[in-house]
Image (cartoon, coloured by chain):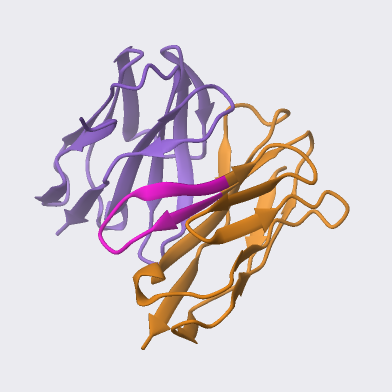
Chain colours: A orange, B purple
Amino acid sequence: GDSVTQMEGPVTLSEEAFLTINCTYTATGYPSLFWYVQYPGEGLQLLLKATKADDKGSNKGFEATYRKETTSFHLEKGSVQVSDSAVYFCALIDTGGGNKLTFGTGTQLKVEL
Amino acid sequence: DTAVSQTPKYLVTQMGNDKSIKCEQNLGHDTMYWYKQDSKKFLKIMFSYNNKELIINETVPNRFSPKSPDKAHLNLHINSLELGDSAVYFCASSHSLGEAFFGQGTRLTVV
């Protein structure tokens, strides 16, 4: 079945540091890939998405590229801020898996001054 | 205007009670979901409805019963609550294979 694997946290960075959160997936069809962010005490918000191979999703300085050859969708940001502290979830929805959004385990990011 | 709204936001109840969580979306989506998030932030899908039809029913105890009176609503009823049911429950909606929009969550505490 479909699955998403992302790096374990927590990840602690200093402000303005470079961020990478790794995400790899397995899917039976042609998935769309997503990154969601959950700020403390809130629901999940879509951060960015990519629907086919080589697409790059970007939003608020975050980027991720859909790499079919490595089945990856790593999240990057060049310079993190304290306000980026949150839990980040990689997810996929697969054309062959029904209307099921499958999430990774989440990666907690803490950014310090 | 809240896109996906769920009520209540907090729910504290005793073991053995029956409770319901309501969810409404005003986005015109055809698919709605219930997810459970545990204390380690792990998200697990429970149910998915498409056009009021149940299409995903993961291995959830039959004490949990979803009900979709129309495409805009998906309620979750839980019978005989147990301590292990304590979690945050999220409702979400989407167009069939599009990104999901989430509600703010209902924090259920069973004591």
x 25%, y 51%: residue: B82
Q: Position of residue B109 (x, y in %)?
A: 19, 56
A43 part of magenta stretch? yes
Q: Quadrant of residue A100?
A: top right
Q: Quadrant of residue A93?
A: top right
Percent x, y for residue B103? 30, 40
Residue range corresponding to the magenta coloring: A35-48
B38, B82: nearer the viewer? B38
The answer to whether any part of residue A5 appears in the image is yes
Q: Residue at x 52, y 36 (%)?
A: B58
Residue occupying the far right of the picture: A69
Q: Main secondary structure of the magenta part?
A: strand
In the depicted view, which residue is nearer to us: A56 or A101? A56
Image quarter (top left, top right, bottom left or bottom right) of the C terminus of chain B: bottom left
Q: Which of A15/A102 is in front?
A: A15
Residue A23 located left or right of residue B38: right
Measured along the vertical axis of the image, is residue B31 above or below residue A53?
above
Image location (x, y in percent) of residue B105: 27, 46
Count the labels in the image.
0
Residue A103 vertical placement versus A8 (above, below): above
Camera-side residue of A2 and A44: A44
Left or right: residue A59 versus residue B109 is right
| Residue B78 seen | no
Quadrant placement of the N terminus of chain B = top left
* Residue at the image position 28 percent from the left and 54 percent from the top: A42
- Is B46 displayed left or right of B102 in the figure? right
**Residue A90, image x, y percentages:** 58, 55
